[in-house]
Image: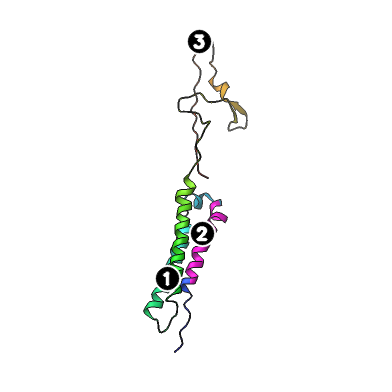
Amino acid sequence: MTRTRNFLPLAGFVVCALALVSYPLFFSRFTVTRDVPWVSWLLFAAGLGMVIMGIRRAFRQPERYRGRVMGPVFGVLSLAVLGFFLFLTLVFSRQLPAGGSVAKVGGKAPDFTLQDTQGRPVRLYEILQPAGAGAPGSWALLIFYRGYW
């Protein structure tokens, strides 16, 4: 009886490599998959499942399937690709540069102009001007979101 090739570990590695490459090239464009890369995690789970099934197949039925050497090699490579992906998405992407000229809490904000809901320009300086002599000025709450994308 001839032994057949066991392509499951190779196919699993290809799926893991596809998960690594597809995130920066495609899935990072969408908010639902950029913030939490759940599609890539599912692809990694499918790829690692294929690798594990291929390794089990090679070791449980060695008389029928080949791949007792290459199966673990592709398994280690798949785990290395997963580790690299986790490092990039969970550690490296969170390394934000320090804000040098960021306004401090309670500090004075620089004057700027933005559009209101009707598209008219509104200056911060105009909002903060007092209504009359001796009258207190208005106040404005400014919220700055610092994202990692």
Magenta stretch, main secondary structure class: helix
The magenta segment is 10-28
- Residue 8, given in percent of the width and then of the height, sits at 46, 73
Evaluate whether residue 108 shows in this view: yes
The answer for how far apart the CA atoms under marks 1 and 2 are is 20 Å
**Residue located 50% across and 65% down the image:** 15
Q: Which residue is mark 1?
A: 72
- Which is closer to the viewer, label 1 or label 3? 1
Would you identify the image quadrant in which residue 83 lies?
A: bottom left
Verify whether residue 35 appears in magenta: no
Q: Amino acid at mark 3?
A: Gly
Structural crowding at the residue carrying mark 3, measured as other residues with C-alpha within 10 Å and reported as few (<14), some (14–19) or many (≥20) = few
The answer for how far apart the CA atoms under marks 2 and 3 are is 63 Å
Query: Quick check: 53 above or below 141?
Result: below
Identity of the residue furthest to the bottom in this view: 1
**Residue located 48% across and 80% down the image:** 5
Upstream in sequence: badge 1 or badge 3: 1
Query: Quick check: 57 above or below 102?
Result: below
Q: Which residue is mark 2?
A: 20
Evaluate whether residue 46 shows in this view: no
Q: Which residue is mark 3?
A: 134
Q: Amino acid at mark 2?
A: Leu
Structural crowding at the residue carrying mark 1, measured as other residues with C-alpha within 10 Å and reported as few (<14), some (14–19) or many (≥20) = some
Does residue 103 appear to the left or right of 119 in the view shown? Answer: left
The answer for how far apart the CA atoms under marks 1 and 3 are is 79 Å
**Residue located 50% across and 53% down the image:** 33
Upstream in sequence: badge 2 or badge 3: 2
In this rendered view, identify the residue nearer to me: 116 or 100: 100
Q: Amino acid at mark 1?
A: Pro
Q: Secondary structure at mark 1?
A: helix
Q: CB atoms at circles 1 and 2 under 8 Å apart?
A: no
